């Protein structure tokens, strides 16, 4: 049993090392780590032209139907290149050694190209490895304080961490907490950014609406690896009935 657990941990650690190497090749870090507005516009133009040529189709990679919404419609660069709509893959794209995945929001109505910051995925992956190692021994996740119904802080000390795990916000550069649901799945808590966006941008959200789109529509990034949020009394709250990373 112990040998099997040890082998699983070694495999997981190797996977993270390999993926981190793909995401962050040191020789390419500086040129590929900053979102480039011109590259984003070029991809958006190529997507618009693709739709015109294909009677409304969108160049996306095939994903499972239950793929979380902000990671479900990744741009298929190969399709754009085959139609000569894009001469090369952007340097900032994961497919070219960059730190971002190019994704599309609202593909049926108004397809817009946005970015997923893969450093967030890497941070969650590293905590997930520690969490799985902990659960191999203790079964139940290391729940901390319950911050909303079914949403918990992580008892970081039980995972051997010095402080609460967080990711750097692609919107505000603030430290956003990583939280956990009842199953032990990890998510980024975007309430800091959502609060600011609700104050800054005009909106007509009502309780029950998914207010994460206020972030996606007013910047280059999508709030990936998150639970849905809605609005209550003017404040963002978790909407845990439907999960989506």
Image (tube, rainbow, N blue to C red):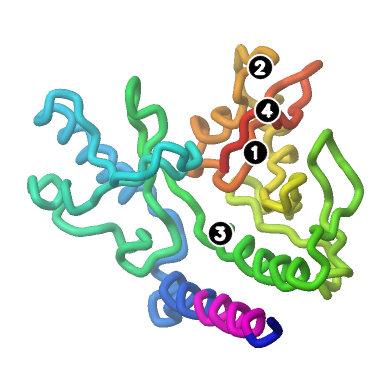
Mark 4 = which residue?
241
Mark 1 = which residue?
227
Q: Which mark is first along the chain, 2 or 4?
A: 2
Residue 135: which quarter of the image?
Answer: bottom right
Q: CA distance from mark 4 to mark 1?
A: 10 Å
Mark 2 = which residue?
208
> In screen coordinates, is 217 left or right of 96?
right
Q: Which mark is residue 121?
A: 3
Q: In this rendering, which labeled residue sits more in front, label 4 or label 3?
A: 4
Q: CA distance from mark 4 to mark 2?
A: 10 Å
**Magenta stretch in the rendered image:** 4-15
Magenta stretch contains residue 162: no
Q: Which mark is first along the chain, 2 or 3?
A: 3
Which residue does the image show at 72% across and 21% down from the upper left? Answer: 231
Q: CA distance from mark 4 to mark 3?
A: 23 Å
Please tell me whether mark 1 sits on a helix, a strand or a loop: loop
Which residue does the image show at 83% across and 67% down from the upper left? Answer: 138
Q: Are marks 1 and 3 in contact (CB under 8 Å)?
A: no
Which residue, as the protein is rendered here, is positioned at the far right?
Answer: 145
Q: Give whichever of 27, 160 is nearer the camera.
A: 160
Which residue, as the protein is rendered here, is positioned at the far front?
Answer: 1
Please tell me whether mark 4 sits on a helix, a strand or a loop: loop
Q: CA distance from mark 1 to mark 2?
A: 13 Å
Magenta stretch, overall SS: helix
- Local packing at callout 4 (Cα closer than 10 Å; few below 14, some 14-19, many 20+) is few
Q: Which mark is first along the chain, 1 or 4?
A: 1
State which quarter of the image contains the C terminus: top right
- Local packing at callout 3 (Cα closer than 10 Å; few below 14, some 14-19, many 20+) is some
Q: Are marks 1 and 2 in contact (CB under 8 Å)?
A: no
């Amino acid at each position: 049993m112990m040998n099997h657990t040890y082998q699983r941990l070694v495999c997981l650690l190797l996977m993270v090392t390999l993926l981190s190497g793909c995401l962050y090749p040191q020789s390419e870090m500086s040129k590929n780590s900053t979102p480039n507005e011109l590259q984003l516009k070029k991809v958006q133009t190529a997507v618009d032209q693709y739709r015109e040529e294909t009677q409304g189709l969108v160049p996306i990679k095939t994903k499972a139907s239950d793929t979380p919404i902000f990671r479900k419609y990744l741009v298929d660069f190969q399709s754009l290149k085959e139609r000569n709509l894009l001469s090369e893959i952007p340097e900032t794209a994961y497919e070219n050694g960059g730190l971002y995945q190019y994704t599309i929001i609202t593909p049926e109505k108004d397809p817009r190209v946005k970015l997923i910051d893969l450093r967030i995925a890497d941070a969650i992956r590293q905590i997930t490895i520690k969490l799985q190692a902990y659960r191999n021994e203790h079964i139940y996740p290391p729940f901390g304080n319950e911050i909303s119904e079914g949403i918990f802080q992580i008892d970081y000390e039980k995972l051997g961490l010095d402080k609460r795990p967080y990711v750097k916000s692609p919107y505000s550069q603030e430290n956003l907490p990583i939280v956990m649901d009842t199953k032990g799945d990890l998510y980024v808590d975007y309430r800091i950014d959502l609060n600011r966006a609700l104050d800054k941008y005009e909106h007509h959200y009502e309780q029950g609406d998914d207010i994460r789109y206020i972030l996606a529509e007013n910047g280059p990034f999508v709030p990936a690896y998150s639970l849905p949020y809605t609005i209550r009394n003017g404040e963002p709250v978790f909407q845990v009935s439907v999960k989506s990373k």
